[in-house]
Amino acid sequence: MGIDVKRIRRDFPILSARMNGKPLVYLDNAATSQKPRQVIEAIYKYYTQYNANIHRGIYAIAEKATQAYTDSKAKVAKHINASSIEEIVYTRNTTEAINLAALTWGEANIKKGDRILISEMEHHSNMVPWQLLSMKKGAKLDYIKLDSSNSELDMQSLGEQLEKKPKLVAITHVSNVLGTINDVKEIAKMAHKHGAKVLVDGAQSAPHMKVDVKDIDADFFALSAHKMLGPTGIGVLYAKRDILEHMEPLIGGGDMISTVDFYSCTWNSLPWKFEAGTSNIADAIGFGPAIDYLDRVGMGSIRQHEEKLTKYALESLEDMKNVKVFGLGKENLKKRGAVISFGIKGVHAHDIAQVFDSEGIAIRAGHHCAMPLVTQRLGESALARMSFYLYNEEKEVDKAVQAIEKVKKIFRID
Ligand SMILES: Cc1ncc(COP(=O)(O)O)c(C=O)c1O
């Protein structure tokens, strides 16, 4: 089923804004998504009608706020097929979710000489926490290499690394640079056979495709609400219940305890033992309607729409002289998300983005928080990147292509 993009666009107030005097063309969805009015209104309604702290007050608006906060978690749990809200820990974002896993599960389970396996296509968020942990513990950080096309993981390299018996495999579901969709279900199966736990960085998959944590058999799964129509300041660490039960809390304080005396305390039940202090209540409440929105449109339909747009963009770019597109080609659409990193020979990515900006088009330029991949593997100092979402249209891709022509003209590139 196709999606009604015109109708969807009407729900996003910012999409009728202008940038530099031109209608805004927002193609930086991998960085953060825009928000529908349903999300904005839910936050407004919380602050104007029932703002109160959760889990404390015994008056009506506090109970309503607690209920709305819990409902939002229930929606997330259902959306990713977690068993219950006990497996859904709210964090600030994917980065904090991965750090929480590293600082609690990692702290307790990674010992000197142990190995942690990640890949060469990781975002810094799924690299630096493991570097820090390895340094602290004297563990070894290994990498699954990219294949010779520099687009996909080399499965042979994965197999070889697994023989070294890592304790953890931490892998991105979709690369924010290459757009590659990794077969995390297969990777988890292989990793589990070798006794490793598996953490999936879902920052770029959860917004764009159906995620089923049980089907993947992920031990941990991290995501950010702000990339999936929700507010900033809310992320999720999903983990299997028995793993969370054995993990110690990271931060102590209010809300995460059950009982406290002067010298000791007992911890609250899951997931609250990981949510010390007053939570980001408003944004958690705003995440609920974002999930509703995605479910209403349907993750399958969103994925289909983005696949079509990606194909259209790849076809539009393929004959452009001196334009280099990174990642898998259009014949591999099933393995590619709606992220297109590209370069124009002889032009710095920042200059490309600046010309786009003057045309009202928002794209990202830089190393995309994946410096080792961009600079060491792809051999580029920076890349331009357009990334699509459910509200983008083919005519916006056309505008991007015209902007590339303009860049080439300004910089006198063929
Ligand atoms: C693959 C990947 N992982 C992690 C992150 C970090 O997300 P956040 O900044 O919301 O923590 C991003 C953000 O772009 C990402 O693309």
Image (tube, rainbow, N blue to C red):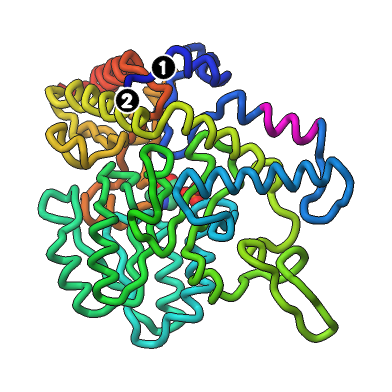
Between the C-alphas of marks 2 and 1, the distance is 9 Å
Res 90 label: none
Left or right, 250 with respect to 349, comes to right
For label 1, count other residues whose C-alpha is less than 10 Å away and answer few (under 14), some (14-19) or many (20+).
few
Residue drawn at the location 44% of the way across and 25% of the way down: 26
Which sits in the foreground, 198 or 347?
Answer: 198
In magenta, the rendered stretch is: 41-48
Kind of element beneath mark 2: helix
Predominant secondary structure, magenta span? helix
Is residue 411 among the parts visible in the rendering?
Answer: no
Q: Amino acid at mark 1?
A: Val
Q: Amino acid at mark 2?
A: His
The N terminus lies in quadrant: top left
Q: Quadrant for residue 323, please give it.
A: top left
Q: Quadrant for residue 405, please give it.
A: top left
Query: Is 43 included in the stretch rendered in magenta?
Result: yes
Q: Mark 1 sits on what residue? A: 5
